[in-house]
Amino acid sequence: MQKDDILEILNFWNFWNNQQFLGIKRENLLKKLFELYSKNFVVSIIGPRRTGKSVIIRQFANELINNGISPRDILIINFEDYRWTGLDLSLLDKIYSVYLEKIKTNKIQKPYIFLDEVHKIPKWERFVRTLLEKEEAYIFVSGSSSKLLSKELATLLTGRNLIMEILFKF
């Protein structure tokens, strides 16, 4: 994929130039996310399909912005978007490189990276572990329980993750 194509998709899903759909605010889940996130752990948001995992990601990103984090320090990648082609580790690396080159302006603030439906990228855990080991970013991943089971996560991230399970939508 070309840089312009990557930027077009990222611009659609991020708060850099437009507002995102936030749905009904889920205070209890937002509070839990603020308790969980840390530079030393990946926060894994799992649950059945259609329970609001993507919406809670956008709500949390919006809360970060409301608390003074620049929208350009937040990267949301929604791998459900049909425009992503060649879903593999090299694409994930290219997306991140384009973000760092074209969007991220504050080199001091660690970015908040949200990988929505991350299970669609084979070997995604290698990318996540590298960023985590380098303490380069705050990392959040999401996926449906059927695709990204808790046992799988524990194995893939070997104790480097905290799991938040969303079981229903209200």
Image: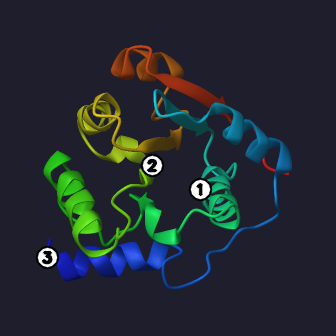
- Towards the viewer: 141 or 82: 141
For residue 156, side relative to residue 145 (left or right): left
Type of the residue with mark 3 = Gln
Determine which residue is flagged by label 2. 117
Q: Judge whether residue 154 can be spotted in this image.
A: yes
Taking the spot 48% from the left edge, 78% from the top edge, the residue there is 16
Q: Position of residue 170 (x, y in %)?
A: 85, 51
Q: Quadrant of residue 28?
A: top right
Looking at the image, do the residues carrying marks 1 and 3 touch, with CB atoms under 8 Å apart? no
Amino acid under disc 1: Ser
Sort mark 1 into few (<14), some (14-19) or many (20+) by Cα contacts within 10 Å: many
Q: Residue at x 54, y 33 (%)?
A: 38
Q: Are marks 1 and 2 in contact (CB under 8 Å)?
A: yes
Q: Are marks 3 and 2 in contact (CB under 8 Å)?
A: no
Vertical position of residue 12 compared to residue 168: above or below: below
Element type where label 2 sits in the image: loop
Q: Position of residue 96 (x, y in %)?
A: 26, 58
Q: Which mark is residue 54?
A: 1
Q: CA distance from mark 1 to mark 2?
A: 9 Å
- Which quadrant holds residue 105? bottom left
